[in-house]
Image: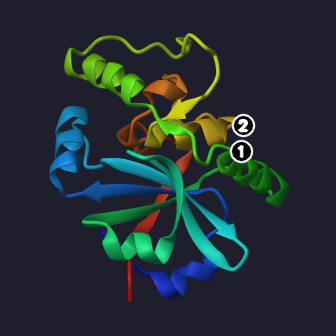
Amino acid sequence: MTIFLSYDAIRPQIKNAEVLLYRGTDIVSRGIRLLTGSQYSHAGLVVWWNERLMVLEAVGNGVVAMPLSENLKHHHGAIDYYRCTETIDDARRLNMVIFAQEQLGKKYAFFQMAIFGFKLLFRMPMSSNEQRANGAYGQFFCSEYVSATYLTQGIDLAASLSAQYTSPDALSKSDKLTLVGVLRKD
C-alpha cells in the first residue's frame, strides 16, 4: 500500500541526511531504470540549510543543492522518502551534512557511471572491496554520493557493494533504510 505524504505536512519531521529515491519518467530515467532493473533512477539527500529544506544530489552538472520544494515541482515522476533504520544522533547527522556540503561543486562521475553501467549490462561482478584507483572521491554519481555520505558515519547502506557500485535500487533494498512514503507537493 502506497502512503502519500503531503510535503507541507511532513516537512517539519524531515531530518538531516534522509534519503530521496526518484522514479523518473523522462527518457534518461527510463534508461537507467531499465539498465538497473529497478523502479528507481536517481537518489539524493535532504538537508536543512537554515530554514530551507534542500536536496543535495549528484546530477549531470555535478554535485548541487536545490530547494526540495522546487525539486518536487520540476521532477517528472515520483519521489520516495526513506529514513535510516539506525538511530543517528544530531551530531552524526551534522557530520553527514558537512561531508555532503563539502562535495558541492564536484563533477559528476560520468566515467565511473559508464563502468558501472557496463558491469550491470554484462552482469559482471562488483566487489565490495574494489575501490577507485585514486582512493578518494573527486567525482560522484547520485547513489554513490548518498552511500559515501552515510559511510562517513560507519553506516554501510549496501554492505555487499563498494560505494562506487551502489545503485538507487541497492539503496531501496538496504536493511538500513525504510520507506516512509511518496512525497507530494501541495
Residue 34 in the figure: left or right of residue 81: left
Exactly how many numbered labels are in the figure?
A: 2
Residue for point 71% across, 44% down = 99
The residue labelled by disc 1 is: 99
Residue for point 39% across, 43% down = 168
The residue labelled by disc 2 is: 152
State which quadrant residue 75 falls in: bottom left
Question: What's the distance in space between the residues labelled 1 and 2, CA to CA?
Answer: 8 Å
State which quadrant residue 26 falls in: bottom left
Rate crowding at label 2 as few (under 14), some (14 to 19) or many (20 or more) other CA atoms within 10 Å. some
Residue 91 locus on image (x, y percent): 84, 55
Residue 185 in the figure: left or right of residue 76: right
Residue 158 locus on image (x, y percent): 51, 32
Res 88 seen here = no
Residue 133 in the figure: left or right of residue 142: right
Mark 1 element type: helix
Q: Could you tell me if the residues under marks 1 and 2 are in contact, i.e. CB atoms within 8 Å?
A: yes
Q: Is residue 108 above or below residue 61?
A: above
Type of amino acid under label 1: Phe
Type of amino acid under label 2: Thr
Mark 2 element type: loop
